[in-house]
Image (tube, rainbow, N blue to C red):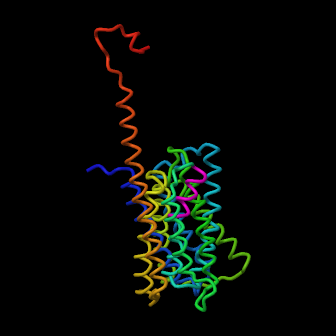
Amino acid sequence: MKLTDNMQGALLMSASMAGFALNDASLKFVGADLGIFQSIFLRGIFAVFLIGSFAYFSGAFKSLPPRPDLGRIGLRSLAEIGATLAFLTALYHMPLANITAILQALPLTIALAAAVFFGEPMGRRRMMAIAAGFVGVLIIIRPGAESFNGFALLGLVAVAFVTVRDLSARRLSPNVSSLFVAFIAAFAIMTTGGIGVLVTQDWTRPSLFELGILAMAGCFLFVGYYCSVATMRIGEVAVVSPFRYSIMLWAMMLGWLIFGDIPDGWTIIGMMIIVGSGIFTMWRERQLRRAAQRAKSSAAQSETPIINQDKPLNRLGIH
């Protein structure tokens, strides 16, 4: 069975989320000892080598993309840097499942941004679903509550940056290599980590075990980068984006197995609200797409001329 664009996009999104979750868990595991800048710098060395090798042998470096695409790649890379710094800072101070749950507002923010900037349809029901999703985010964060963690706000900053990142990738020309885009992003993050280490002068000699963990993180990041770029260029935003929720399963499992973190009741309720909003958004988009296809088919049939052989063609309005 041939997979549709949306089915391919859904599979790529799920693979991307698995890669990012495993990468996040790896960085959180070694980050307490090495720090954020050294961690992303060392991981970046492995990621740049891996992604660069694949890009070179696939011919991604043979020609530069057009100038408009270079601008979009630059914007995407800057957004990637902002998202990485905001998210990892929050990750080091919060349970993995909690900060990951906050990022599940992404399908909602992307759908909203796609409607505002790209003119994609956004009806009243989908707007209500997006509003409900943001209520779920507030339940997870619980501002003003005794358990409120101020680092959760950095999670919202990361959401904004990733929204810009993914929508920038969607505007790239079809002939721009996803590997080239992923390589630029990985190189930008590695460079940011290196500059951060030089500025802070905070260097800890890593053990072989920590280097091994960071090497695996680089591999996981490669999967996340490549699939996240490819999926936003294949499927429809509103249909593909909800599959980001698969990352919560990975985050809860890894958080429990590695760090012994279990989400509390309010966090789980917030997750369920966000997931419900995303599922409704996906279902509603599918219904609208089918209705549009039926309307287009009906219009095409109604415009088909019926030729009467007993009358001249010019009297039938045929030119």
Q: Is residue 213 left or right of residue 66?
A: left
In percent of width and height, residue 175 lies at: 50, 44
Residue plotted at (44% across, 78% down): 251
Residue 82 lies, in percent from the top left, at: 64, 68
Span highlighted in magenta in the image: 107-118
- Residue sitting at the far left: 1
Q: Nearer the viewer, residue 34 or 279?
A: 279
Q: Residue at x 39, y 50 (%)?
A: 5
Decide: is 176 above or below 16: above
Q: Position of residue 191 (x, y in %)?
A: 65, 66
Vertical placement of 62 versus 228: above or below?
Answer: above
- Left or right position of 279 against 307: right
Name the residue furthest right.
Answer: 199
Q: Position of residue 229 (x, y in %)?
A: 50, 57
Q: Is residue 164 above or below residue 104?
A: above
Residue drawn at (47%, 72%), measured in percent from left and top? 274
Quarter occupied by residue 199: bottom right
Of residues 34 and 56, the one nearer the viewer is 34
Give yes or no for residue 108 being in the magenta stretch: yes
Quadrant in the picture for residue 13 = bottom left
Q: Is residue 283 found left or right of 104 in the rendered image?
A: left
Compared to residue 233, the image places residue 51 above or below, namely below
